[in-house]
Image (tube, helix red, strand yellow):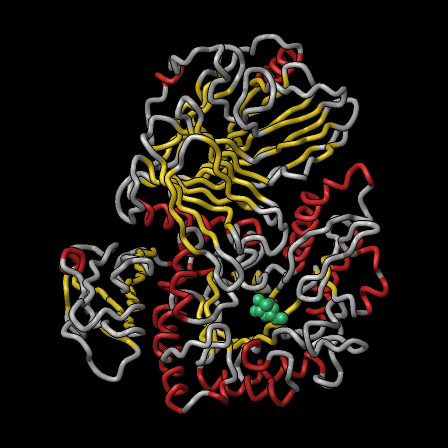
Amino acid sequence: MKKRLLPLLAALLAALGCARAAAPAVIDIRTDGLSLVLCANDDGTVVLRHFGGRIDDVAPFAAYRTHRRWDHGADDEIYPAAGGRNFRLPALRATHADGDPNTELRYVAHEVLPTGDDNVTQTVVRLTDRRQPLDVELLFTAYAREDVITVRSRITNREEGPVVLHAYYASALTLHGHDSYLLTQLRGGWADEAQVEHLRLAHGTHSISTRKLVKATHSENPAFMLSLDSDRFDERHGEVIAGALAWSGNYRIDFSIDEYDVLTVLAGANPDGAAYTLDARKTLATPEMIYTYSAEGAGRASRNLHDWARRYGIRGGKRGHVPTLLNSWEGAYFSFDEKTLCGMIDDAAEMGLEMFVLDDGWFGNKYPRDHDRAGLGDWEVNAKKLPGGIDRIASYAHERGLKFGIWIEPEMVNPQSELAERHPDWVVRADGREATQIRNQWLLDMANPAVQDFVFGVFDRTLALSKKIDYIKWDANRHAEAFGSKYLPADRQSNFWVDYAEGLRKVMERIRAKYPDVLIQACSSGGGRVEYGALKYFDEVWTSDDTEALSRARIQYGTSLFYPAAVIGAHVSASPNHQSGNVIPIKFRFDMAATGRLGMELQPRQMSDAERDFARRAIASYKEFRDLVEEGDLYRIGSPYDPSGTFATMYVSKDRRRAVVMAYCIRYRGHTPVPQFRLEGLDTATHYKVRELNVDHARCWFDGEVLTGAFLHHEGLNPPLQRLYDSAVYLLEAQ
Ligand code: GLA
């Protein structure tokens, strides 16, 4: 009883503008290696005192003072609002119902919530404005073994009328006491995703952001690493903080260093052009920001995120192997009939693949989907191409021992479609202005519940086409622009950006409630939806439309910084490659795809006999070690950016008894230099037998040798990779 009254009393006092009531001074949130320490100041502000290596004795923080002049700006608030003394970028900026543009959040209460998982603790911190009945709840979830803390916020309007939120971030993190911050981020474009950039943060503000809403993560990914006190990105050494935002919408992460050298990281939905009107008695839930900390360089930060993702973050994270597959896109594009598809299924089965995925082109009758200019939105089977329906193809796949998957793009519509004729009001467009087309298509307005029902219905009806559909590839091939929602009232138009993302989330919730076991891939012109908001519902991502193995070296490396291999779709495609025109040996193509979820995407009939023989062998060997790719610890040995032109990727089983090392040469530098890869993650005292896979005979002195973990770590392996596209795969097994 007493426990429940205290927060109420505190809320009352805070609402009256009084000093905080009996607030505990220190709020201690921790994992095995990370501490996040909050303090409630005398004036009721809640400040972040520490985010970094674990501190067991947090009592001194009660007396901690910054020694900064109190009249020179606000302290390091955990959720800085625009108002009072705060001149930093605010996590929350609101215009209250009565027009007041100030918010000063004060402590109300905090509570540790039960989770039912002894690895997970949840702490909620409740704040309210000094004057207005506007509340903020910060929810911190700490994952002990993974050294991950996630943060999300809930903003509740208890005022008499609507409040306009001009900024509503998920979290704010202040860091101090470091000489420098090296930011690592991913940039790119279509077919060029996840390119790694490093920059030293300077005073002022730098942002990672998008306003594209859909197909958003090509250009910038909402994830980052900060190497502390170092100008060097280091896989093995130094303190690193990594963050990733879970939000399938517009995002922004701001890094702002002020005159006190305090770095504030704000992360959340991008408020730019997206002021959100929050009606009275409504709550806005922000996205979740995921943080981890490593005292052992970037490698450990990635492994923490991967562990967290596999255990808690990804819808399919707890399931068994994901099938190797043949996807029809680059093999058939829009031109196929039952014979083509059954032939591909036969070939896939013969090579040892485990699933066939029918990509774009199977639907539309009045406007057949024979190209990308028509049919999108009309999700009935094209009777000319597939007279026996989807069930005939899916059944054939199952008869041949393969699972079956199918492509949909339910958020989109071609102007040339029956859907566009029936529901012009569902299209995102501004009255009296051009509805822009991208890839000849429009975006449907997911802020509209009728569209949400339709999109759910597309998924539902597609699965009803056959009982043998095991997998859905969900595509989204354009971004939002020239926006306008027929559903939202004129004074709520800028709610569109949040409401679209929320609409998608609601649909995915419904889909997962009804179809918990169907595998779903998030594709968006390749890697346009690679983020943890999508991964909560999708099992994997299509990493890039660039299937060329050389480009994939950087794309998959960059993606691996934040996302586990278990979600990284990687396909072997034809040579010359359809995107780059590059000619690459089949072995290199397979060895590169094997660092992720292996698939193929070509017309097998166009492969030579030698290529097919190799494919059979490589698919079989992948099955031997894929548990390591899916569940093991990733160690990046060098990088595809290294001037040496060689690098390796290794995965080690959790018990350190098995490992796979995949090594590549991506630049010819004459025949003198030979790479030397010092391996990581092994047990120094264990003896490992080294076996090269995907070759006919031994190519190096250590093939078949038994070497200690100490040898492999301190001396390493020196595979003879000297020519462009030389590659090698070694399996290490404890003896
Ligand atoms: C997008 C996807 C591709 C393929 C095509 C089909 O570009 O990224 O993988 O599915 O659409 O139109």
Res 641 → quadrant = bottom left
Screen quadrant of the N terminus: top right
Relative horizontal placement of residue 621, taking residue 150 as reference (left or right):
left
Check the image and report above or below for 503 versus 1: below
Check the image and report above or below for 308 versus 320: above
The total number of labels drawn is 0
Screen quadrant of the C terminus: bottom left
Residue 467 in the image, given as x and y percentages of width and height: 66, 73
Residue 275 in the image, given as x and y percentages of width and height: 69, 35
Which residue: 59% across, 72% down?
A: 405
Q: Viewer-proximal residue, 297 or 623?
A: 297
Which residue: 68% across, 45% down?
A: 497
Check the image and report above or below for 125 versus 438: above
Res 87 → quadrant = top right
Relative horizontal placement of residue 304, taking residue 220 as reference (left or right):
left
Q: Viewer-proximal residue, 407 or 264?
A: 264
Relative horizontal placement of residue 641, taking residue 174 as reference (left or right):
left
Relative horizontal placement of residue 480, taking residue 108 as reference (left or right):
right
Which residue: 61% across, 8% down?
A: 18
Residue 421 in the image, given as x and y percentages of width and height: 85, 65
Q: Viewer-proximal residue, 427 or 580?
A: 580
Q: Is residue 638 visible?
A: yes
Q: Is residue 735 visible?
A: no
Q: Viewer-proximal residue, 384 or 345?
A: 384
Query: Residue lying furthest top in this view?
Result: 18
- Ligand 1 lies in which image quarter? bottom right
Check the image and report above or below for 230 versus 723: above
Residue 610 in the image, given as x and y percentages of width and height: 37, 89
